[in-house]
Image (cartoon, grey):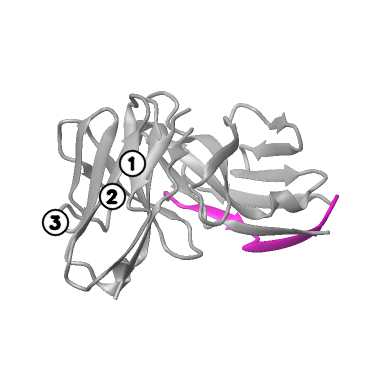
């Protein structure tokens, strides 16, 4: 129940296209849903996050869509650039335990 | 934000030995965590490092194998004991602030190879 599912495992997108990564969860105790971006050889870095009382959050080219009833959320990267090529992890926080659970990750490659 | 330094950045160790990884933060933080990331895989939480008390371990991780210390609000260590090749992984220190624990800051990790 503390699992976060993520798809696809890998994604190839043309430069300028839209990258979409989907996540799902079961545990209703999750109350905060961040996305992390990780480049090879680096630690993950917080990209954008959303609370379940909000249906959408946009920061620049990155948008999170959240569907509380379906227990699903997704990351959209508009106008994808080669510099966006990285591994993306969706995650969820359990407030009562103050810990963050990560999804399995999506390897994104943006090709020119 | 917080700047996190981990040492060593990488090491090659022999089976049966132990290695201690250090995590130093440039400011006082409420929460410190240790994650493991196996090559090409996701992050798995090992434990929450508690200042002045025993760490809180996740299922599948035990203190005898992964002893953790946190003597103050800016420093923690993780020891990987009696290593086997299965312990080859990247170990990541992460920090957060109570009330904002979804916003984690990570070090660059310590890549451990056990022969």
Q: Are marks 1 and 3 in contact (CB under 8 Å)?
A: no
Look at discs 2 and 1 and give the one toward the viewer. Answer: 1
Chain of residue at mark 3: B
Mark closest to the chain's N terminus, 1 or 3: 1
Q: Position of residue A31 (x, y in %)?
A: 49, 32
Badge 1 crowding class, 10 Å Cα cut-off, few under 14, some 14 to 19, many 20 or more, is many
Q: Which residue is mark 1?
A: B33
Q: Name the residue located 29 percent from the left edge and 40 percent from the top edge.
A: B48
**Residue A91 percent coordinates (x, y):** 52, 44
Q: Which of the 4 image quarters holds residue A93?
A: top left
Q: Give the residue at mark 2.
A: B58
Residue at point 61% right, 57% down?
Answer: A106
Within 10 Å of the Cα at label 2, are there few (<14), some (14-19), or many (20+) other Cα atoms?
few
Q: Which residues are magenta?
A: A2-16
Dot 1: element: strand
Inter-mark Cα distance, 1 to 3 = 17 Å
Q: Earlier in the sequence, mark 3 or mark 2?
A: 2
Q: Image point 27% across, 54% down: which residue?
A: B59
Give the total of numbered labels: 3
Of callouts 2 and 1, which one flags the residue occurring earlier in the amino acid sequence? Answer: 1
Real-space Cα distance between discs 3 and 2?
13 Å
Q: Residue at x 48, y 62 (%)?
A: B41
Mark 1 vs mark 3: same chain? yes
In the rendered structure, find residue B64 and report the number of the disc placed on it: 3
- Disc 2 is placed on an element classified as loop
Question: At which x and y percent is residue A56?
Answer: 70, 32
Q: Chain of mark 2?
A: B
């Amino acid at each position: 129940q503390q699992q976060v599912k993520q798809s696809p495992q890998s994604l190839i997108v043309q430069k300028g296209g839209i990258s979409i990564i989907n996540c799902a969860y079961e545990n209703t105790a999750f109350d905060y849903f961040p996305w992390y971006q990780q480049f090879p050889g680096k630690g993950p870095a917080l990209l954008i996050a959303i609370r379940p009382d909000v249906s959408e959050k946009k920061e620049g080219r990155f948008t999170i869509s959240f569907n509380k009833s379906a227990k699903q959320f997704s990351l959209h990267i508009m106008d994808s650039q080669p510099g966006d090529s990285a591994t993306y992890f969706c995650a969820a926080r359990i407030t009562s335990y103050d810990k963050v659970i990560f999804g399995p990750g999506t390897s994104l490659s943006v090709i020119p | 934000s917080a700047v996190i330094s981990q040492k060593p950045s990488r090491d090659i160790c022999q089976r049966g030995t132990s290695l201690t990884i250090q995590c130093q933060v440039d400011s006082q933080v409420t929460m410190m965590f240790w994650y493991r990331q196996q090559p090409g895989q996701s992050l798995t939480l090992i434990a929450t490092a508690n200042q002045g008390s025993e760490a809180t371990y996740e299922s599948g991780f035990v203190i005898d194998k992964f002893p953790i210390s946190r003597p103050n609000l800016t420093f923690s260590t993780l020891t990987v004991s009696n290593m086997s090749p299965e312990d080859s992984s990247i170990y990541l220190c992460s920090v957060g602030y109570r009330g904002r624990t979804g916003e984690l800051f990570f070090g660059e990790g310590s890549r451990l190879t056990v022969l």
